[in-house]
Image (cartoon, grey):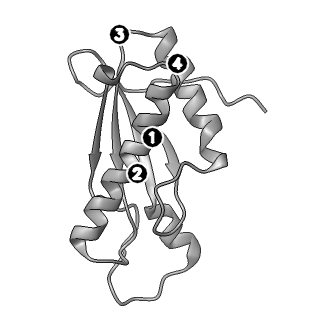
Amino acid sequence: DIIIYFDFDKSDIRADAIVHLDSVARYLNEFPALSLLITGHCDCRGTSDYNIDLADRRSEAARRYLNDHGIDANRMKSEGYGINNLPNSCETGVNYTYTEHQLNRRVILYFQESRNKKTKNVAIPAPAS
């Protein structure tokens, strides 16, 4: 799985995410039988409805970036989960650190086999430095 992060209340692809998305595009071009599930997530600030919308925009931004870089839209599915499936506990009204919130503001890209089963232990090449 590949994780890219977003700034607070934003769905723009950050510069640090581009190298990861470019690696994903290269990998998908090398293995055309794979597809991608793209899930968007948020920190706990904002309403539930707003966070679902923001998570959708984040996953869609990643899908659009990959589509613009040669990956067929039919090979990708994007979904927004809002504050569901957080890697840490994030509760409204509690003061969390910047880092704790940052871990929640993410998109996860899951490689899948053509029959929509998550592929285990798929290694992609590290981004070029």
Q: Is residue 23 left or right of residue 8?
A: right
Extreme residue in the front direction: 68
Dot 3 or dot 2: first in sequence order is 3
> Residue 54, can we see it?
yes
Who's the residue at 36% across and 16% down the image?
A: 34
- Is 123 above or below relative to 14? above
- Residue at mark 3: 33
Query: What amino acid type should be assigned to the residue bearing mark 4?
Result: Tyr
Q: Tag 3 or tag 1, which sits nearer the N-term?
A: 3
109 in relation to 98, above or below: above
Closer to us: mark 3 or mark 2?
Answer: 2
Q: What is the x, y in percent for residue 30?
A: 51, 9
* Residue receiving disc 1: 62
Q: Amino acid at mark 1?
A: Ala
Q: CA distance from mark 4 to mark 3?
A: 11 Å
Give left or right: position of 73 versus 5. left
Whichever of labels 4 and 3 marks the residue nearer the N terminus, that label is 4
Q: Is residue 122 above or below residue 47?
A: above
Closer to the chain start, of discs 4 and 1, is: 4
Q: Which residue is mark 4?
A: 27
- Rate crowding at label 3 as few (under 14), some (14 to 19) or many (20 or more) other CA atoms within 10 Å: few
How far apart are labels 4 and 1 at the CA level? 15 Å
